[in-house]
Image: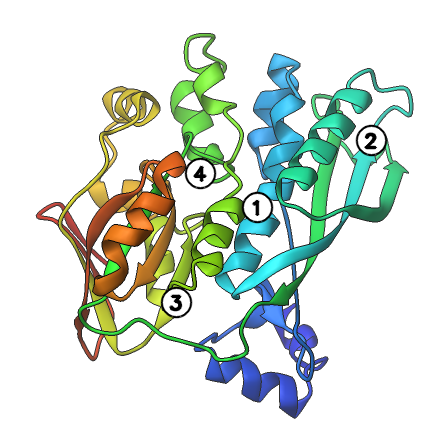
């Protein structure tokens, strides 16, 4: 598939993506060359299966909006507009209104409208246990043209997650199944970090990197630069859902840190001189100084004495 998609890229787009250290562009938010616009698309994965089993779809709209809104932030962009695609087995699905309200509320929190979309009735394409599927595409606008990178000595500030967000559910479901005790933890909606980042840009705090901790876990940090590593010296208190997952299965540290967010949903890289100001502005999102950027010609993430990534 990638070979065919690559043929759609002009030399301008390919050179731009190379400048961003993006080896394969198809899974990332990317700028449209010659404009201030960025674009990304995503879904919520197998979290939908748990929502269907529990008949709880209120979190799913926020998950879908949050995944793309947070990804846009990593391209130094704020959302301008969203479009959703909703596939249904039944045109009279009783949870449609709940999901629509969730989408609308989340879009408002991200400060961008849902300007269109598609609702398809495709019962033959969906499993009987899966009443719907959803994806959202987002268009954003960059708040700065210059692409900055982490520098040795910069500080990493982590913002708390609410749980797994919308990644790592295939493994989590295999471990926990449909457990009434853990289901509320697993269905916690993804946090939208747009207001947090807007607070920093409004205060004109220089941002050297923004990372949405999604698929791949903390390996996402390595996308920022080829010439630095990250030394993590402080970690958040473990969320109960991760304690339960690890107690129910023998999962090695590497798998945990490259599958789940482990309590940090978003990481912000800033010059160390702005640390105190940033922590004060980010108070509503439970900020934590995680560690520092270090010089390295082969990027790694050193997570205390627990694990080294990759």
Alpha-carbon distance for marks 4 and 2? 24 Å
Look at the picture and state if 34 lies above or below 113: below
Whichever of callouts 1 and 2 sits on the residue coming sooner in the sequence is 1
256 or 272: which is nearer to us?
272
Q: Nearer the viewer, mark 3 or mark 2?
A: 3
* Residue found at x 70% / y 47%: 136
Q: Nearer the viewer, mark 4 or mark 3?
A: 3
Decide: few, some or many residues near mark 2? Use Cα within 10 Å; few <14, some 14-19, many ≥20.
many
Quarter of the view holding residue 41: bottom right
Alpha-carbon distance for marks 1 and 2? 21 Å
Pointer 1 and pointer 3: residues touching (CB < 8 Å)?
no
User: Which numbered disc covers residue 88?
Assistant: 2
Whichever of callouts 1 and 3 sits on the residue coming sooner in the sequence is 1
Residue 303 position in % (x across, y down): 17, 51
Residue 212 position in % (x across, y down): 44, 52
* Residue found at x 37% / y 69%: 224
């Amino acid at each position: 598939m990638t070979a065919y998609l690559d043929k759609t890229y002009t030399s301008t787009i390919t050179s731009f993506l190379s400048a961003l250290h993006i080896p394969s562009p198809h899974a990332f938010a990317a700028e449209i060359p010659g404009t201030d616009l960025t674009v990304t698309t995503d879904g919520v994965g197998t979290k939908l299966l748990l929502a269907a089993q529990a008949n709880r779809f209120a979190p799913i709209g926020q998950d879908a909006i949050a995944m793309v809104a947070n990804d846009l932030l990593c391209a130094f962009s704020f959302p301008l507009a969203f479009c959703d695609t909703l596939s249904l087995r039944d045109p009279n699905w009783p949870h449609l209104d709940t999901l629509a309200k969730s989408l609308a509320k989340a879009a408002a929190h991200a400060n961008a409208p849902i300007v269109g979309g598609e609702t398809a009735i495709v019962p033959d394409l969906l499993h009987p246990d899966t009443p719907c599927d959803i994806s959202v595409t987002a268009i954003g606008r960059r708040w700065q043209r210059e692409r900055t990178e982490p520098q040795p000595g910069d500080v990493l500030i982590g913002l708390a997650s609410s749980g797994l967000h919308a990644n790592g559910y295939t493994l989590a479901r295999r471990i926990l199944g449909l457990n009434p005790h853990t289901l509320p933890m697993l269905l916690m909606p993804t946090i939208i970090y747009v207001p947090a980042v807007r607070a920093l840009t409004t205060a004109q705090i220089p941002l050297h990197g923004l990372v949405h901790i999604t698929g791949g876990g903390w390996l996402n940090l390595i996308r920022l630069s080829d010439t630095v590593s990250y030394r993590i010296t402080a970690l958040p208190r473990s969320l109960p859902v991760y304690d339960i997952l690890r107690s129910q299965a023998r999962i090695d540290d590497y798998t945990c840190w490259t599958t789940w967010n482990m309590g940090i949903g978003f990481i912000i890289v800033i010059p160390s001189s702005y640390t105190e100001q940033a922590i004060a502005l980010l108070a509503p999102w439970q900020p934590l100084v995680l560690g520092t950027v270090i010089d390295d010609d082969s990027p790694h993430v050193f997570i205390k004495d627990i694990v080294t990534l990759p």
